[in-house]
Amino acid sequence: MLKTLLDRNRHWAERRSAEDPAYFPRLAALQAPEFFWIGCSDSRVPANVVAGLEPGEVFVHRNVANVIHSADMNMLSALEFAVETLGVREIIVCGHYGCGGVRAATEDMPHGLADHWLEPIRRLARAYAVDLAQCQDIEARRDRLAELNVIEGVRRVAETPIMQRAWGRGVDVRVHGLIYGLRDGRLRNLDCSIGPGHFLAEAPV
């Protein structure tokens, strides 16, 4: 399997170089992505592929079920680097329908460490229990919960000191929430974007 992977990489690199001899030198010279993408680790949702972007156009952080934990130093470090160093001005929190992490959060069975990671989704399920009960079946409820998880993620990103400081300095950076459909390959805007107006006066600048 490893040899197959390395062979595929070699064929891909050779093909790209033949199509565009400056492709790899151009990528190596500068990283200037337009987007910072916080997405799910699901192998079916690679950020640049589903967004129709080339490598170098999107800076990516992924975790199980695209959960935003306020103490996740990995995500926070990537967010700070994206905003402060790379100058990214469009941040996307993207979930997807049919998410295994959301399903695990709604199942009454142990999932090891994932149970701790997915606790924010269970809290959302409890907070929106009445609304979720209106969905026609369990899969519809899980898909709606996946949307709510994205919306909550956008809010949590916006409330980080990193974003608050950037907005306090007048930086025009925005946070958006999208959901991806595995069945049709389409991204949908959840209309929960937050911009510079979401500035907490008490945040350190």
Image: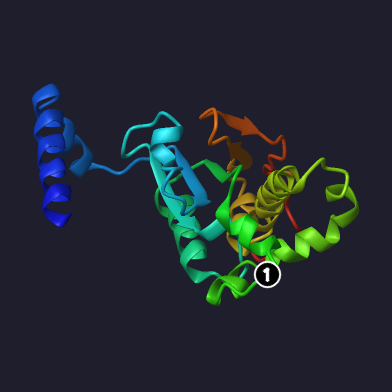
> What is the x, y in percent for residue 105?
66, 63
> What is the x, y in percent for residue 155?
71, 53
Residue 203 in view here: no
Whether residue 148 is situated above or below residue 73 in the rendered picture: above
Is 74 left, or right, of 179 in this rendering?
A: left
Amino acid at circle 1: Glu
> What is the x, y in percent for residue 39?
51, 49
Q: Residue at x 10, y 44 (%)?
A: 7
Q: Residue at x 22, y 39 (%)?
A: 27
Badge 1: residue crowd in 10 Å (few <14, some 14–19, many ≥20): some
Residue lying at the far right of the rendered structure: 130
Quarter of the image with the C terminus in it: bottom right
Under circle 1, the secondary element is: helix
> What is the x, y in percent for residue 28?
19, 44
- Quadrant location of residue 29? top left
**Which residue is denoted by mark 1 in the rendering?**
119
- Quadrant location of residue 53? top left
